Amino acid sequence: MYDASRNMSPFSQPSKAAVPKVLQSFSSRKLLNVARNEAVFSQGARADALYYVVSGQIRYSFTSPSGKDAMLSVFSEGDFFGQRCLTPHGRFFGTAFALTDSIVLRLSAEEARTRLREDQHFGALLFANILQRTHEYEEVLTLHLVDNSEQRLASILLRLAHHSNSRDGALKPIFGISQSQLAEMVGTTRSRVNTFMNRFRQQGFVTYSEDEIVVRPELATTLKNHGR
């Protein structure tokens, strides 16, 4: 099983503003430089650490026994992931790997559980992040129930573009996500996603290449026009 701490070295110290003050006080903290496509942890591995994204993007996916891969989420700057470590003897439900070169802060599970009980500031920070993710998962579920595939794709692109720079809410380029992965998130086929993406590009809502998608704010009009 992949052990992230075995071959990932600490990265140069980022600005303190990039790491919340409450996390700087963790004695177990370790900054990791995660290269694009490198795994942070693997599905089924012992959940021995909590992670915080300092910069970059982390893809979280689940692989079924039959080998089918499903992308569950994308974590960006300011996100925690690996919360299964907060349950004793937990194991990671999926695999996390970098979509882009990223800097991740690793916190030991033991210290995270202790601080969660004793430090209200850490608890508030972690709870706020979990609550935000819960709202996003509710939105995704709603999209699958009431919206058509094109609207779901527009919503997902806007969310990814906003979330890739979560500190200021501006739309930023989306890196490292293929049309096949978008199809997984939308719940449709790659060919349909390609059709929708071409339509969005013709309308001036997006531009894209093999590794980058640039979303324009006007894409939101596709949702407004459908009563969203």
Image (tube, helix red, strand yellow):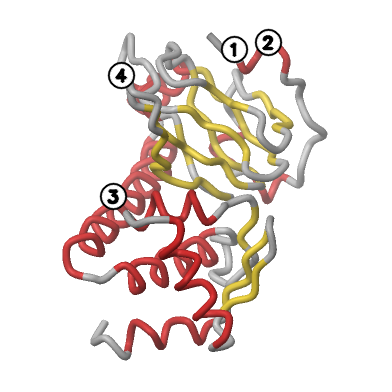
Q: Which quadrant holds residue 202?
A: bottom right
Q: Where is residue 24 in the image (x, y as percent from the top left)?
A: 62, 34
- Which quadrant holds the C terminus? bottom left
Name the quadrant containing residue 148: bottom left
Q: Give me the C-alpha separation between circle 1 and circle 4.
A: 19 Å
> Which mark is drawn over residue 3?
1
In front: 80, or 117?
80
Callout 1–callout 2 Cβ contact below 8 Å:
yes
The residue wearing badge 4 is 87
x then y, percent, for residue 89: 33, 9
Type of the residue with mark 3 = Thr
Residue 19: quadrant of the picture: top right
Q: Nearer the viewer, mark 1 or mark 3?
A: 1
- The alpha-carbon separation of the residues under discs 3 and 4 comes to 18 Å
Residue 222 lies, in percent from the top left, at: 38, 85
Residue 118 appears in the picture as rendered:
no
Mark 4 and mark 2 residues within 8 Å of each other at the beta carbon: no
Q: Name the residue under label 2.
A: 6
Q: Where is residue 117 in the image (x, y as percent from the top left)?
A: 33, 25
**Local secondary structure at mark 3:** helix
